[in-house]
Amino acid sequence: VKNDSVEVYFQPIYSNGCRKIRSAEALARLYDPELGFIPPDEFIPKAEQNGSIMQLGRQVFEKTCRFIRDNDLDSLGIDYIEINLSPVQCLQERLADELLDAARKYGISMDRVNLEITETSTMDSDVTGNNMKKLVENGASFSLDDYGTGFSNLINILNLPLGIVKIDKSIVWSYFNDSRDILPHVIRMFRSQKLEILAEGVETEQMANELAAMGCDYEQGFYFSKPVPPAEFIRYVKKVNAG
Ligand code: C2E
Ligand code: CA
Ligand code: CA
């Protein structure tokens, strides 16, 4: 983190309404010359414990700002990039100001940014809520990540300025693999609250089609693309959105 060596990969997000790639999620990657790529599931929890998550998060945010500045998102058909926020970041009172400063430094508009928070972040609604309010006032939008894996209070969730709910892959997979049918109910519930739905972990064409029929607005998963480096992401979007 100190060497500024956190890389950012992008995973495309497909819109069923437009039948195009409309956004992407920025995902942190750490490469070690001896160990190779270290998975974020290993280094993010460590960074949250030792406090370096603040610097790591800022690095991912700034590198994503640079990507947004250096590419013509409109001509690619991309509206915004989703960036993950750790609950540790959301609890910092200065978070919103820091992100706004960084966006200003790169000259990008906050409406190019969608921030993903998890259910854990919704539990302290005061600090997180103030940060969200300030960021939304400045044009950013929010997604709730990994829905179905946490212990959040549904009313807290519905009181936050969220635009999209990302249904965790465990709920998506349990529908297709174990015929557990909570997924359609979850989708209906959030749609009735005027939230958009994104299904994670879409791995096959059959899943993609059924999820679209069930009313998912967006889909993300290996069926479309794995997270890839920026240049590869641009090539992929040009190919898919041209057809
Ligand atoms: P996440 O936010 O749920 O990100 C999605 C993860 O699911 C990514 O793993 C992605 O590669 C994986 N994935 C996407 N589609 C599929 C699929 O169809 N099948 C399967 N099997 N997996 C799929 P990744 O990149 O290893 O990231 C793991 C987690 O690390 C992320 O989960 C997120 O919680 C955390 N993370 C990654 N980058 C950042 C970051 O910049 N900041 C923070 N705070 N957390 C991050
Ligand atoms: Ca995420
Ligand atoms: Ca997720």
Image: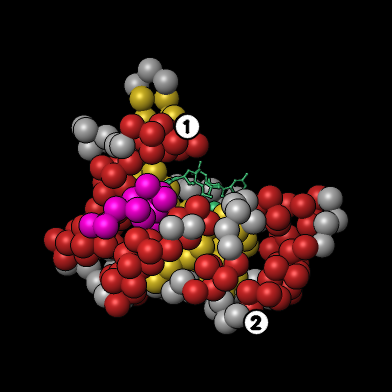
Callout 1 crowding tier (Cα within 10 Å): few <14, some 14–19, many ≥20: few
Q: Residue furthest left?
A: 105
Distance between the alpha carbons at the discs numbered 2 and 1: 37 Å
Left or right position of 101 against 56: left
Q: In the rendering, at what x and y percent does residue 55 appear?
A: 26, 42
Left or right position of 117 against 188: left
The residue located at (33%, 32%) in the rendering is 50
Location of the N terminus (image quadrant): top left
Q: In the rendering, at what x and y percent does residue 216 appear?
A: 65, 71
Examine the structure image and report whether residue 81 is included in the region drawn in magenta.
yes
Disc 2 or 1, which lies upstream in sequence? 1
Q: Is residue 166 above or below residue 11?
A: below
Q: In the rendering, at what x and y percent does residue 99 appear?
A: 24, 60
Callout 2 crowding tier (Cα within 10 Å): few <14, some 14–19, many ≥20: few
Residue marked by disc 1: 42
- The residue carrying mark 2 has its beta carbon less than 8 Å from ligand 3: no
Residue marked by disc 2: 192
Front-most of 48 and 25?
A: 48
Front-most of 217 and 228?
A: 217
* Magenta segment boundaries in residue numbering: 80-94
* Quadrant hosting residue 210: bottom right
